[in-house]
Image: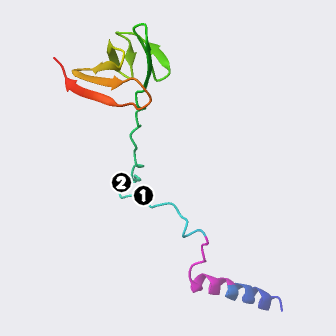
Amino acid sequence: MKIIPIWIMLLLGTTHLMCGQMYDPFQKTSKPKASAAGLLPPPAMTAPIPAPTVVSAVMNNKAFINGHWYGIGDKVNNQEVTYIQNNFVGLKEGNRLTMISVGSTRHVLGTKDVP
C-alpha cells in the first residue's frame, strides 16, 4: 500500500515536467535585452540650456546683470563686459560682441564679429 502514494507522486511530478513552462507574471515588465556585445543602448542626452543674460540696471559704470553687479572687464557666463552705456551693455565672447539693452525686455540690440 505504501507503493501507491509514491507512484502517484512520481506520476504527478513527471507530468508537470512534461507539460511545459510555468507562467511568468513578470515577463511583460522585464528589462530590455542586452545587445550581442552585452551593452545596453546609452540613455538620451540633453544639453543644458544656458540661462538668458538679463541686464536690469546701469549705475556708476556698473551693470546689474543676472542679479549681480559687474564692471568693465568682469566675466559673466564666459563673456567679458566690454561696454557699459546708459541704454546698453556690450559683452564679448572670443571675437563676438553682443550688445544687450537695459530693461526687462532682454532685447539683443546686435551681434557682430570684432577683430
Along the viewing direction, whichever of 50 and 7 lies nearer the viewer: 50
Query: Residue 77: percent from the left, percent from the top?
Result: 39, 23
Seen from this angle, which residue lies furthest top?
Answer: 60
Residue 55: % across, % down: 42, 23
| Pick the front one: 76 or 89 | 89
Residue sitting at x 44%, y 61%:
33
Q: Is residue 16 magenta?
A: yes
- Looking at the rendered structure, the kind of residue marked 1 is Ala
Q: Badges 2 and 1: C-beta atoms under 8 Å apart? A: yes
Does residue 50 belong to the magenta stretch?
Answer: no
Report the front residue among 84 and 91. Answer: 84
User: Which residue is most to the left?
Assistant: 115
| Residue drawn at the location 40% of the way across and 49% of the way down | 44
Determine the image quadrant of residue 94. Answer: top left
Name which residue lies at 55% across and 70% down.
27
Which residue is label 1 attached to?
A: 34
Return the x and y of residue 49 as percentages of the image width and height: 41, 37
Part of the protein shown in magenta? 13-25
Q: CA distance from mark 2 to mark 1?
A: 8 Å
For residue 17, side relative to residue 110 (left or right): right
Residue 30 located left or right of residue 75: right
**Extreme residue toward the front, this view:** 86
Up the image or down, 33 lies above or below 109; here it is below
Q: Which residue is mark 2?
A: 37
Q: Please indicate whether residue 97 sits to the left or right of residue 68 in the image.
A: left
Which residue is depicted at the point 68% across and 88% down?
11
Quadrant occupied by the C terminus? top left
In the rendered image, the vertical position of residue 29 relative to residue 22, given as above or below: above
Kind of residue at badge 2: Ala
Q: Say few, some or many: other residues with alpha carbon within 10 Å of mark 1 (under 14 / 14 to 19 / 20 or more).
A: few
**Coloration of the structure image:** rainbow
